[in-house]
């Protein structure tokens, strides 16, 4: 894959995370625990697939695009 395409994809996938996080917050407002659990399971699968099926292959090819690379967790 061309690096310019990889960069554009990563930018879009990172941007996709924001509305997905909004969905997680809204799911938290559901009163029915069984429905909430089902929705959380579904959104977790989507988020996991975005990462494992889309982002990881890009980062394997272009590790320099990993925004978390080299971070130690301390600020």
Image (tube, rainbow, N blue to C red):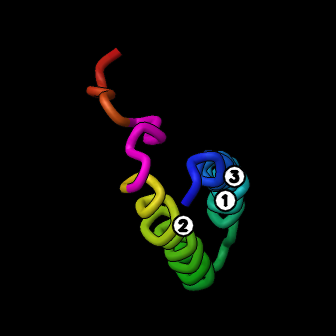
Q: Which of 39 and 7 is in front in this view?
A: 7
Q: Mark 3 points at which residue?
A: 12
Identified at 43% across, 63% down, the residue is 57
Q: Is disc 1 in contact with disc 2, using a CB cutoff of under 8 Å? A: yes
The verdict on residue 60 being magenta is no
Residue 41 rendering spot, x and y as whole percentages = 51, 78
Residue 62 rendering spot, x and y as whole percentages = 43, 47
Identified at 56% across, 48% down, the residue is 3
Q: Name the residue under label 2.
A: 50
Q: What span is in magenta? A: 61-68
Identified at 42% across, 60% down, the residue is 56
Disc 1/disc 2 C-alpha distance (Å): 11 Å
Q: Nearer the viewer, residue 7 or 74?
A: 7
Determine whether the residue tagged by mark 2 lies in a helix, strand or loop.
Answer: helix
The verdict on residue 64 being magenta is yes
The quadrant of the picture occupied by the C terminus is top left
Identified at 68% across, 70% down, the residue is 30
Determine whether the residue tagged by mark 3 lies in a helix, strand or loop.
Answer: helix
Quarter occupied by residue 47? bottom right
């Amino acid at each position: 894959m061309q690096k310019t395409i990889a960069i554009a994809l990563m930018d879009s996938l990172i941007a996709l995370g924001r509305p997905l996080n909004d969905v997680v917050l809204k799911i938290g407002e559901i009163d029915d625990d069984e429905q909430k659990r089902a929705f959380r399971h579904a959104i977790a699968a989507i988020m996991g697939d975005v990462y494992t099926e889309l982002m990881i292959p890009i980062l394997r090819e272009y590790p320099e695009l990993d925004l978390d690379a080299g971070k130690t967790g301390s600020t």
